[in-house]
Amino acid sequence: MSILRNPEPGKELVLYYRRGNDEQELVTLTTVRQRPLWRFFSTDDDEWILWRWRDFYYDCSTKGDDLVGWQINTDVDITSDFVRAEQYRAVRHRPDKITDILSESPKPPERIDLESLIPPQLQLEATDKGSGKWLLSVRAASSEETPTPKPEDICLWINDHKYKQRLSNLPETLEISVDQLRQGKNYIVAQAHDANGGRGDSQWIWITVEPSQVQRPKPCIFGICAGVNNYSKVRENNTQLGDLKFCIKDSEAIRDALLKQSNSDYFGNAEIVMLNDLDVSHGKIVETFKNYIKSAQPDDLFVLFMAGHGTAEPYSTPERNSEYDPATFTFVTPSFDINDPKTRVTFWKPPNDNIDDNRTSIYDLMAQLPCNKLVMLDCCYSGSALEVNILRTLTPERIGPIIMTACDKDELSWEASGNGMFTAAILGALGEAFATADRNGDGGLSFDELTKWVVDDVPKMVRTASPDLTQHPQVVVPGWLPQELRFVSIAD
């Protein structure tokens, strides 16, 4: 027995024993063969997910929950369905549950009804009617072999434009025309939610619009540049945020760079609304968005640049009050009052959040724009907002605009030499470093080239300023990247 009391790591023992008067000799090993309570999966491009395989709770990077999921099997002659964990992010993305399972005294895994992990299923079909028109048909795709939940909150996306907010009676057929589509490939998908918090996506279909099919003027470029330096009034409202130095200067510089794109090889008119300090309010931002929603055309480009503080609040439930709720992430305006919801510029609100129009989110407003969209956020996050992944906040349904944020969620956005370093990198790509940033040398800076330059250049600038600092811009680039749109050099 001394061998068992003092085991050697990695050394396996074989035990022979009998039970009572039984003559049969039994054999067993000392190795414990038990499946781990959690799994960790990572990729070469810094995506990762850590998940509890028994109850499907997880924490992840921006796109980590695209990497794993579960397979739904029926009969042997029926193709299995695969459900991504991301489709249940609303209920299964629980960093607090991961913290618990990694603690010294974790709670037992929860019992899961497997039927609650089967999302609603939709079928989407497109029929070409000719003359630049298509019929889109959406129907429920449940079957006797795989019963699925009743679809709720059904919507239809054309690229990152929520073309139809609610489809009420399935099956439903809609007619779209070439005038509602962008030049090039258009990606279309129907989505539905269910009572269990899951989301079902139809298969993606695409419709390609050739330049010969439409006669359009050059796309317009328009947007909002907002910068806030002065937070004295916010401090009067019991939120302790310091003033910033270069947010207004950054916003004005980005505005000027965008205006210089007008009447270029790629764009026609340019119109940028500038909001500084006290001009920045939820009402003014919503008003500007709504004006653009009325006039935007599919090939246009909308740009949103915001520089200032960001903040967030903890979940209201006791078990999650140490974790910050992405739905509360707010761009802090000069009139921000933590006790007054009307002063908040929120980026996203959950579908079941019945808050009135005074809290219309940035995500909801952008989804109404039929055009291409580029979001650039240079926010000096306060401590609470450091834990919020704004890239996921702005793509809650896995659909959204091109997004660049100045830093990762646990970093700060640094300022030096008269600009934020994030802004300085953008201006450099459009200006003095244009020839280097334009990787293929075609004289136009694509969105892909711009984002790659910023991701590579900012860390170098920060290390040059101080080897002890870090800042890594984060980027989400959708599949419908408008390859035809380019920026021209603004260098003198």
Image (cartoon, grey):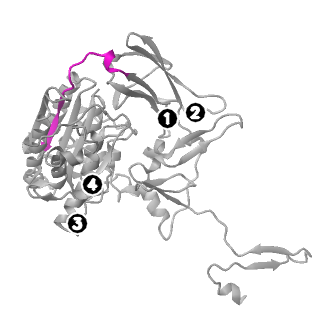
Q: State the CA–CA distance, disc 1 to disc 4.
A: 36 Å
Per the rendering, the mark at residue 200 is 1
Q: Secondary structure at mark 1?
A: strand
Q: Is residue 236 above or below residue 106?
A: above
Q: Is residue 296 above or below residue 320?
A: above
Range drawn in magenta: 209-226
Say what amino acid the circle numbered 4 marks.
Answer: Asp
Residue that badge 3 annotates: 469
Residue 131: horizontal and vertical position, in percent? 38, 9
Residue 167: horizontal and vertical position, in percent? 42, 23
In depth, the one of 59 and 205 nearer the eye is: 205
Say what amino acid the circle numbered 1 marks.
Answer: Gly
Say what amino acid the circle numbered 3 marks.
Answer: Leu
Q: Secondary structure at mark 3?
A: loop
Residue 210 falls inside the magenta stretch: yes
Residue that badge 2 annotates: 148
Mark sitting earlier along the chain (1/4): 1
Mark sitting earlier along the chain (2/1): 2
Q: Are marks 2 and 1 in contact (CB under 8 Å)?
A: yes
Q: State the CA–CA distance, disc 2 to disc 4.
A: 45 Å
Mark sitting earlier along the chain (2/4): 2
Q: Is residue 116 above or below residue 165?
A: below
Say what amino acid the circle numbered 2 marks.
Answer: Thr
